[in-house]
Image (tube, rainbow, N blue to C red):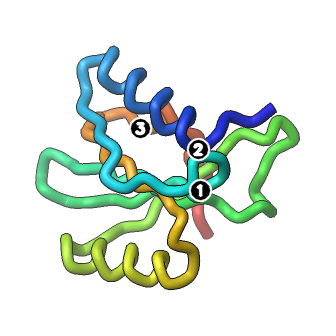
Amino acid sequence: MRLTSEMFAAYVVRRVFADGGFAAVLRRGAEAAGAMFFTLRERDGSIRLLCPAPQSLADEKGDRRFLMEAIADEDKLEQRFAREARFDPDFWVVELETDQPERYLTIVPGD
């Protein structure tokens, strides 16, 4: 059985905090099945975005998987979320400050 989006967000936030990092839910979406996006703040000020991977990259266990997307700046990030909101307003955004996001999330290589 897959965790709800709300439980998954809480799980990731708690694990990051337990390991000394920072995490915060910036946008709450649908409790049961809202798409999850994670912003990664780097020490050099750069931003990366982890987006839900397409179903074609799913594994047999049904784990949530994410693709890395480079974001130039805050304006581009806000534009990306505005486009997503027009498509699906029920998405979540969780911000992470950690050196090892792959410790908490399954990140798959992009094309």
Q: Where is residue 11 in the image (x, y as percent from the top left)?
A: 49, 27
Viewer-nearest residue: 87 or 23:
87
Q: Is 91 located above or below residue 63 in the figure?
A: below
Q: Position of residue 24 (x, y in %)?
A: 29, 40
For the residue marked with disc 1, what is the amino acid?
Gly
**Quadrant location of the N terminus?**
top right
Asked where in the image residue 25 lies, by quadrant, the reply is top left
Q: Mark 3 points at which residue?
A: 101
Residue 109 visible within the image:
no
The tag earlier along the polypeptide, 3 or 1, is 1
User: In screen coordinates, is 17 left or right of 93?
Assistant: left
Q: Name the residue under label 2.
A: 5
Q: CB of mark 2 within 8 Å of CB of mark 1?
A: yes
The image's mark for residue 110 is none
Residue 65 visible within the image:
yes
The tag earlier along the polypeptide, 3 or 2, is 2
Disc 2/disc 1 C-alpha distance (Å): 6 Å
Disc 3/disc 1 C-alpha distance (Å): 20 Å
The tag earlier along the polypeptide, 2 or 1, is 2
| SS of the residue under disc 1 | loop
Asked where in the image residue 22 lies, by quadrant, the reply is top left
Q: CB of mark 3 within 8 Å of CB of mark 1?
A: no
| SS of the residue under disc 3 | helix
Q: Name the residue under label 1.
A: 34
Q: Which residue is drawn at 26% across and 60% down?
A: 47
| Mark nearer the viewer, 3 or 2 | 2
Q: Residue at x 42, y 52 (%)?
A: 28
Viewer-nearest residue: 105 or 87:
87
| SS of the residue under disc 2 | helix
